Image (cartoon, grey):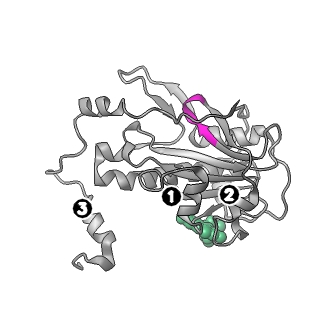
């Protein structure tokens, strides 16, 4: 094994985030409950709110959807219904139940280490029926979306990308933004791994739901973090965009 140095920081990190019998993680549950109180379940963001209306039951063959999923461009921009948007958000990362346990934690439609849900989801929407174009925040615990910037247009979003080919003609561009400390306070360095896994879970949900809706979806990492973070008003350090997915 190579000794970690500046050229393989990943290995240094990986070694230092492994679990052993001697690790002092996760921290005791009483501490988790106490510290968790410092983190609100969702962000306080001002703006017009819309309650999601996901479709009732739609029959799709799950295995066929998994086979059909592929990264696809969208040939031209056309309308999307609010119900489609609602289904994408609700089934990917919506909140589904209050647990009856002591913590009365809201569960979501994607797994999360310790049920801490560090990922916040933002998106740009264009040509979606019933809602204005602009930047939105998904308030998952309430299954609502919040329009917080109507001034942002497609060109402003495209500026954040290396090339706009993958996002061209997409109605929705989702931004996966962890509040790293929401996982790290409990799992320390190891928590940094978990946020990426969780972004992957939510993203895969989105890709499969989009495929089931016969939409084209594409994961995109060719973006400039500092520009996306600025667009979304994130500090870019302990709250930053780590992944984007475009659906149209
Ligand atoms: C983490 C990740 C980042 C990606 N970033 C880009 C990207 O920046 N631009 C792009 O065109 N495709 C991007 N893709 C899509 C891949 O090119 C695509 O998944 C791959 O070619 C496999 O094809 P498939 O998704 O159709 O199975 C990305 C995929 C993943 C998983």
Residue indicated by mark 2: 246
Name the residue rendered at 62%, 49% in the picture. 206
Q: Residues within 10 Å of mark 3 (few under 14, many from 20)?
A: few
Query: Do we see residue 136 in this rendering?
Result: yes
Residue indicated by mark 3: 16
CA separation in Å, label 1 and label 2: 14 Å
Instruction: Locate residue 156 relative to residue 233 in the image: left or right.
Output: right
Q: Nearer the viewer, residue 76 or 64?
A: 76
Q: Residues within 10 Å of mark 1 (few under 14, many from 20)?
A: some
Q: Earlier in the sequence, mark 1 or mark 3?
A: 3
Question: What numbered label is drawn on residue 28?
Answer: none
Name the residue rendered at 59%, 69% in the picture. 222
Which region is colored magenta?
Answer: 137-142
Q: Quadrant of residue 99?
A: top left
Element marked by disc 2: strand
Picture quarter with the N terminus: bottom left
| Residue 166 place in picture, x, y as percent | 70, 67
Name the residue rendered at 80%, 45% in the picture. 128
Residue indicated by mark 1: 242
Ligand 1 is found in the corner quadrant, namely bottom right
Q: Quadrant of residue 96?
A: top right
């Amino acid at each position: 094994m190579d000794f970690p140095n500046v050229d393989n920081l990943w290995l240094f990190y990986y070694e230092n985030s492994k679990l052993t019998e001697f690790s002092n993680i996760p921290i005791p549950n009483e501490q988790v409950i106490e510290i968790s109180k410092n983190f609100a379940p969702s962000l306080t963001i001002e703006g017009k709110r819309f309650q999601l209306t996901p479709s009732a039951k739609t029959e799709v063959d799950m295995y066929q959807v998994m086979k059909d999923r592929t990264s696809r461009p969208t040939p031209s921009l056309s309308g999307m219904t609010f119900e489609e948007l609602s289904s994408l958000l609700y089934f990917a990362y919506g909140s589904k139940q209050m647990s009856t346990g002591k913590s009365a934690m809201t569960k979501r439609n994607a797994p999360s280490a310790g049920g801490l849900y560090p990922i916040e989801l933002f998106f740009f929407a264009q040509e979606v029926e019933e809602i204005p174009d602009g930047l939105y925040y998904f308030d998952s615990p309430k299954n609502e979306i919040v329009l917080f910037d109507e001034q942002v247009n497609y060109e402003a979003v495209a500026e954040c990308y290396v090339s706009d080919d993958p996002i061209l003609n997409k109605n929705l561009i989702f931004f996966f933004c962890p509040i790293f400390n929401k996982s790290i306070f409990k799992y320390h360095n190891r928590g940094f791994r978990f946020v990426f896994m969780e972004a992957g879970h939510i993203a895969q949900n989105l890709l499969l739901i989009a495929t089931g809706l016969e939409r084209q979806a594409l994961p995109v990492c060719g973006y400039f973090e500092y520009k996306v973070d600025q667009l979304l008003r994130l500090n870019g350090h302990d709250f930053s965009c780590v992944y984007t997915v475009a659906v149209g």
